Amino acid sequence: MTPTTAATTTTTATTDALPGLAQGTWSVDASHTELAFTARHLMVTKVRGRFTDLTGTVSVGETLADSGADVTVQMTSVETGSADRDAHLRSGDFFDVEAFPTMAFRATSFEGGSLTGDLTIKGVTRPVTFDVGFNGVATDPWGNLKAGFEASAEVNRKDWDLTWNVALESGGVLVSEKVKLSLDVQLVKSA
C-alpha cells in the first residue's frame, strides 16, 4: 500500500502539534487497533460490531498537509457476537463480501482535530470526516516506536447503498440508517 498525500488541505500547521510523532511511514498495528461500529436495532437498543482484519499506513510529513493515510479492511472480518447476524452482514443484503471483499479509506486532509478522506464500501466512494484525538507516542519494551489515535464519525449507511431494512408495525425500522464509527488505532514506526 502506498501512503497518500493529503493534497486538498491548505493548512500549513506543522506536525509539532503532535509531539513525538516522527516524520516518515507508520504502519497500523492491527493487533492493537479496533475499528468498531454501532447501529440502533428496533430503534430502542444498540448493536455493536467490529472489523478484525485491517492493514494500513500513515505517512507523516513536515506539515499536516504533507501527511496522509491509506487503510484497507477485509469485510469478511465483521464480528457482532452473532454468527447469524454476521452472515447476514456479509450477504448481498449488506456488504456483499463476495463481490466487494474490502472497504478502503484514503485521507484527503488532516487538520489536527479532524481527518477527512474518501471511504469506499461496495464500490461507492463518499467523503467522511472523523473527529481525531492524538493519545501520544511511546516506545514498547522491544524498542518499537508506537503512536496512538482515537477517531469517531457518524455516517448514513444508505450513502453506500447499504439500504436493506424492515419497517416496524410500531413505526420506525429494524436497523437505523445512522451508524457510528469509532477507531482506536495504534501505529508503529516502520520507516
Image (cartoon, grey):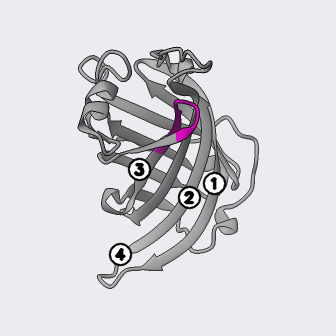
- The residue identified by callout 4 is 144
Amino acid at the residue labelled 1: Val
* Residue 122 image point, x, y percent: 40, 20
Q: Is residue 162 above or below residue 4?
A: above
Counting from the top left corner in percent of width and height, residue 130 is at 62, 44
Q: CA distance from mark 4 to mark 2?
A: 20 Å
Q: CA distance from mark 4 to mark 3?
A: 16 Å
Name which residue type carries label 4: Asn
In this view, the residue in front, 97 or 126, is 97
* Residue at image mark 3: 57
Q: Callout 2 environment at 10 Å: few (<14), some (14 to 19), or many (20+)?
A: some
According to the picture, the residue beneath numbered tag 2 turns out to be: 150
Amino acid marked by disc 2: Glu
x%, y% of residue 92?
32, 15
Q: Nearer the viewer, residue 126 or 61?
A: 126
Nearest the camera: 142 or 185?
A: 185
Local crowd at mark 4 within 10 Å, few (<14), some, or many (≥20)?
few
Q: What's the magenta region?
A: 37-45
Which is closer to the viewer, label 2 or label 3?
A: 2
Which part of the image, by quadrant, shows the N terminus?
Answer: top left
Asked whether disc 4 touches disc 3, contact meaning CB atoms under 8 Å apart, the reply is no
Pair 4/2: label in front: 2
Residue under label 1, please give it: 132
Q: Give the distance between the C-alpha atoms of the residues marked 2 and 3, in whole angstroms.
A: 16 Å
For the stretch drawn in magenta, the main secondary structure is: strand
